[in-house]
């Protein structure tokens, strides 16, 4: 298919652009296969806007006489207005944008056409391989092994080719366990706590069914993570009633009679349509321009967004507490093990592991616990909060995780090497990007699409020194301790950097941030001078003492 077939009107003049925090500007609008480009009529012909079609969530058309208006609502929550003279021209442009922003084929998306204008210093596709993670693990324990049982994606289509499992469990046993777990997602290592040797595993639900089916290999696998005489905890992200209902459909949960050393705890975390509806209501509340505080707060509360944040942080704290304070191993799962399970395991690691609070450590966490672990980004991020089409599998699962990280970041501002902007960039690229990192639903699909060969990795761009400087937190001081976030209502705030950034000007916040960075820099310079003077004084005192000795 040629993109030209979808573009009825490639160019329109005398178009007026209305963008948040900018004066209306007249210029020329051009449509390409992947971008909507607006150029002003200024002498330098500076581009005012380059918008990826894949970033468009929905469009609305309005007409007043012969003047047409297109309102574009973006996946990054921006709202842009274009005033186009001529009804036919406006209709043609609107239908072209609709067609280009809803392409069926993944291979027609921009990452397959994008060629970087920067020097590629690092291949992001090979920056965070599981083999490297296993090397780090092997330096502190020999109880685990790297299994390639899923080399051809034949055992579990949503797992990566290599996984880390207990050394005592062979590949044949893993194949049997895979048949006993939903979608073949058998328990694999998510995190190893060096402090006490406890492990966090993740999987999908066991297929016990109404007959109470069991799998001795499954029991042996998860028991292999327990210390002698110790208990473990299964954190099920479904309410008990839902877990019991799942048995009628062939699913289920670990029954105590077969798993006597494991205590099951149900911590309900919302999924799919409930989460998406909450996201839509929250964005609607944030766009409410009535300036009525009571109404706004009522809408915010009705969205239940902060309730989902609290539930998720509570479950993550529970997992971390079991590992760090109870010295117990943990197995986390819901139904499929691709959404709430990954939210809990990754947030627990933010709490427990200082490495995950560094830039590269956090990138490795996203790769390991989201991309390699099979979170279906293509399905979940197909629509944002403005889409008019019927929901299928969309849900802001990854955004909710990023917001929880931001909430912890806000409570421990010196413990993270990255800043808020880094989290916002990950949110934006998960929904629309020139990079191939978040395309596909799992490693199997990415391999079939040959993404590492045909597209550029987001990490290749992010980890360039000039970009990294934008994402560094000036307050960062490495903290090797476990950090315990508060989930009290007064401790949780709305993430203004995402949800209000297009509604409120950030000029003064940006100026304050620059001033803060300058103060920190000056403070470090003074500290260096103080240290130098102290050394000088110590040397002078030592010389004085040397002269006084006979």
Image (tube, rainbow, N blue to C red):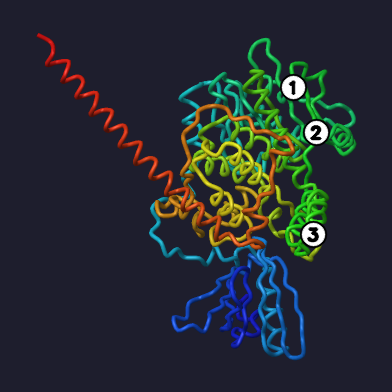
Residue 380 appearing in the image: yes
For image coordinates 59% across by 43% down, the residue present is 372
Where is mark 1, residue-wise?
A: 216
For image coordinates 70% across by 78% down, the residue present is 70
Compare marks 3 and 2 and give the one earlier in the sequence. Answer: 2
Compare marks 1 and 3 and give the one earlier in the sequence. Answer: 1
Q: Is residue 483 left or right of residue 522?
A: right
Q: Is residue 492 left or right of residue 250?
A: left
For image coordinates 64% across by 62% down, the residue present is 502
Answer above or below: position of 403 versus 250. below
Residue 247 x/y as whole percent: 87, 34
Answer above or below: position of 14 versus 504. below
Would you identify the image quadrant in which residue 536 lies?
Answer: top left
Residue 184 appearing in the image: no
Q: Mark 1: which secondary structure?
A: helix
Q: Residue furthest left?
A: 550
Choose between 384 and 299: the one closer to the eye: 299
Where is mark 3, residue-wise?
A: 292
Choose between 329 and 308: the one closer to the eye: 308
Closer to viewer: mark 3 or mark 2: 3
Where is mark 2, residue-wise?
A: 207
Separation of disc 1 and disc 3 at Cα?
60 Å
Q: Quadrant of the C terminus?
A: top left
Answer above or below: position of 132 versus 481. below
Residue 526 x/y as whole percent: 34, 39
Q: Are the two marked residues, 3 and 2, in contact with CB atoms closer than 8 angstroms? A: no
């Amino acid at each position: 298919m040629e993109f030209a077939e979808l573009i009825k009107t490639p160019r329109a003049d005398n178009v007026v652009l209305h963008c948040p925090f900018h004066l209306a500007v007249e210029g020329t609008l051009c449509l390409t296969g992947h971008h909507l480009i607006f150029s002003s009529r200024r002498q330098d012909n500076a581009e005012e806007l380059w918008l990826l079609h894949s970033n468009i969530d929905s469009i609305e058309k309005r007409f007043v006489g012969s003047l047409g208006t297109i309102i574009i609502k973006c996946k990054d929550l921006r709202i842009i207005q274009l005033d186009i003279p001529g009804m036919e021209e406006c209709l043609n442009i609107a239908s072209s944008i609709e067609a280009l922003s809803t392409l069926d084929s993944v291979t027609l998306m921009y990452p397959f056409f994008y060629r970087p204008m920067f020097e590629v210093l690092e291949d992001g596709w090979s920056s965070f391989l599981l083999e490297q993670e296993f090397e780090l693990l092997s330096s502190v324990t020999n109880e685990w092994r790297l299994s390639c049982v899923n080399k051809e994606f034949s055992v579990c289509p949503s797992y990566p080719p290599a996984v880390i499992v207990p050394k005592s469990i062979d590949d044949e046993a893993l194949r049997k366990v895979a048949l006993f777990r939903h979608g073949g997602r058998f328990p694999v290592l998510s995190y190893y706590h060096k402090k006490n040797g406890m492990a966090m595993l993740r999987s999908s639900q066991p297929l016990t069914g109404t007959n109470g089916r069991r799998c001795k290999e499954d029991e042996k696998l998860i028991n292999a993570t327990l210390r002698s005489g110790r208990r473990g905890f299964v954190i099920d992200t479904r309410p008990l009633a839902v877990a019991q209902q799942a048995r009628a459909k062939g699913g289920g949960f670990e029954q105590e009679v077969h798993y006597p050393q494991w205590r099951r705890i149900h911590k309900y975390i919302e999924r799919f349509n409930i989460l998406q509806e909450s996201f839509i209501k929250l964005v609607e509340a944030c766009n409410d321009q009535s300036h009525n505080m009571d109404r706004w707060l009522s809408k915010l509360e009705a969205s239940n967004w902060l309730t989902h944040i609290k539930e998720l942080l509570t479950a993550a704290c529970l997992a971390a507490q079991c590992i760090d304070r109870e010295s117990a191993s943990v197995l986390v799962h819901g139904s499929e093990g691709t959404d709430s399970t990954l939210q809990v395991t990754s947030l627990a690691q933010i709490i427990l592991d200082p490495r995950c609070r560094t830039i590269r450590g956090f990138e490795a966490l996203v790769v390991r616990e989201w991309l390699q672990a099979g979170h279906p980004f293509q399905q979940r991020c197909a629509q944002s909060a403005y889409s008019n089409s019927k929901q299928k599998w969309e849900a802001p699962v990854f955004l909710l995780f990023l917001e929880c990280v931001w909430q912890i970041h806000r409570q421990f501002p010196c413990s993270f090497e990255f800043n808020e902007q880094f989290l916002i960039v990950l949110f934006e690229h998960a929904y629309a990007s020139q990079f191939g990192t978040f395309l596909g639903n799992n490693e199997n699909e990415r391999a079939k699409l040959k993404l590492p060969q045909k597209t550029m990795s987001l990490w290749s761009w992010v980890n360039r020194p000039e970009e990294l400087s934008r994402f560094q937190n000036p307050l960062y001081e490495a903290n090797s301790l476990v950090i315990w976030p508060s989930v009290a209502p007064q401790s949780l705030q709305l993430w203004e950097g995402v949800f209000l950034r297009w509604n409120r000007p950030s000029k003064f916040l940006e100026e304050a941030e620059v001033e803060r960075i300058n103060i920190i820099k000056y403070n470090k310079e003074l500290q260096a001078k103080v240290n130098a003077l102290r050394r000088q004084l110590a040397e002078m005192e030592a010389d004085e003492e040397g002269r006084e000795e006979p």
